[in-house]
Amino acid sequence: MDAQTRRDGRVIEELGHYDPVGSSENELKFELDAERAQYWISVGAQPSETVASLIKRKGVVILSKSERRRAKKARQAAASQ
């Protein structure tokens, strides 16, 4: 969602869908384009706690801002050596 629009406002890009009922009690049905989720997180998108937990279930790593900075510095240091 675009932060500058209302809660039910314009969607920038749909990354998947979620069925909270699911087919059984232990299974949540959701589809997620993990590659696009990783892209949006890498450019600064901040998922809600609920969405972040679903993204993590699909195996996408969500780094905090400080972790991204440390990783970037490590890549730059490795490239300069």
Image (spheres, rainbow, N blue to C red):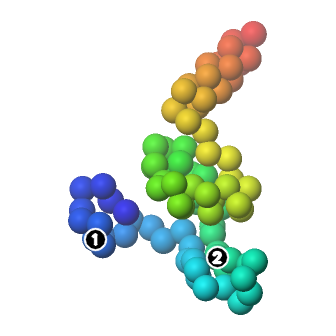
Residue 3, compared with residue 16, is above or below; it is: above
Which amino acid type is shown beneath numbered disc 1? Gly
- Residues 75 and 31: in front is 31
Which quadrant of the view contains residue 23? bottom right
Sequence-first tag of 1 and 2: 1
Residue 19, compared with residue 68, is above or below; it is: below
- Residues 9 and 76: in front is 9
The percent position of residue 76, horizontal first and vertical second, equals: 64, 19
Q: Is residue 58 visible?
A: yes
Total count of labels: 2
- Residues 36 and 50: in front is 50
Looking at the rendering, in which quadrant would you find the N terminus?
A: bottom left
The percent position of residue 10, horizontal first and vertical second, equals: 30, 70
- Residue shown at 75% from the left, 77% from the top: 26
Looking at the rendering, in which quadrant would you find the C terminus?
A: top right
Which amino acid type is shown beneath numbered disc 2? Phe
The percent position of residue 67, horizontal first and vertical second, equals: 60, 29
Tag 2 residue: 30
Horizontal side of residue 22 vs 41, given as left or right? right
| Crowd rating for badge 2 (residues with CA inside 10 Å; few <14, some 14–19, many 20+) | some
Q: Is residue 35 visible?
A: no
Helix, strand or loop status at disc 2? strand
Tag 1 residue: 9
- Residue 26's disc is none
Helix, strand or loop status at disc 1? loop
The percent position of residue 4, horizontal first and vertical second, equals: 24, 56
- Residue shown at 64% from the left, 75% from the top: 31
Horizontal side of residue 49 vs 25, given as left or right? left
